[in-house]
Amino acid sequence: MENNFAVEKSRMIKEQLRGRGIKDERIIQAFRDTPRHLFVPQGYRNRAYADRPLPIGDGQTISQPYIVAFMTELLELAGDERVLEIGTGSGFQTAILARIVDEVFTVERNGDLQARGESVIKSLGIDNVHYSVHDGTVGWKRYAPYERILGTGGVPEVPSSLLDQLDEDGLIVIPVGSKRQQRLYKVKKRGQKVTYSKGVYCSFVPLVGSEGW
């Protein structure tokens, strides 16, 4: 079975990542080093490297591989950042970020879901992730500011708390729109100036919270 996963991972990298324009070799290597099937429930592991999102329980999903890579690339990472992730979910995106940047601070409102992801991440020897269970739409003020913030669920508008906790030279990537369809926003802060760029259409589960849904 592990041999099959290795073959499927290589195909995923070739067709879904490189084939669609992912160029950052650090992201490619992070995918190569991270066994995606471990983040997927047992009953779906035969589809872990497929070009689609998969259910992980509690009404949540693990995003398709390309979307994880694409959003990571949109963050324009230098490698020395402290990244706030809103929505730990399966933990796969968390692990990809942690292999590239200095520290990841990840927030999830579902404690059971985060515990499963944390267990897998730690089993891989990744130790630069900080975990919290609370309403992620209000960020994680204790460790702010963050150079990068990534939202892994859809919001009706960019939460003001995330903007407040963003470094003065920081960047947010987050899906913004309705519950059924969003666009990936890239939000850049330069001092007191904030600019918003609308990207591709997408469909993420809603981020539930006081500044989300």
Image (cartoon, rainbow, N blue to C red):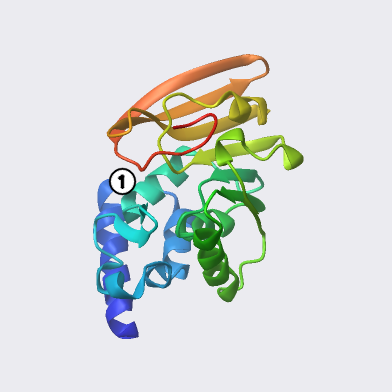
Measuring from the top left, give residue 69's x and y in whole percent. Answer: 40, 50
User: In the picture, which quadrant includes the C terminus?
Assistant: top left
Q: Secondary structure at mark 1?
A: loop
Residue 22's x, y, as percent?
36, 48
Residue furthest toward the top?
A: 193
Count of all numbered marks drawn on residues in the image: 1
Residue 40, percent across and down? Answer: 37, 67
In the image shown, does 136 or 194 lie closer to the viewer?
A: 136
Front residue of 139/134: it is: 134
Q: Quadrant of the N terminus?
A: bottom left
Q: Is residue 158 shown above or below 63?
A: above
Q: Amino acid at mark 1?
A: Gly
Q: Position of residue 30 (x, y in %)?
A: 48, 61
Residue 167: which quarter of the image? Answer: top right
- Tell me what residue is drawn at x 45 percent, y 44 percent: 152
**Outermost right residue:** 142
Q: Is residue 76 visible?
A: no
Residue at image coords 56%, 31%: 171
Q: Which residue is mark 1?
A: 21
Which residue shows up at 58% across the image and 41% down it? 135
Please report the residue visible at 46 percent of the width from the left and 46 percent of the height from the top.
72
Residue 126 seen in the figure: yes
Seen in the picture, residue 210 relative to 60 is either above or below; the reply is: above
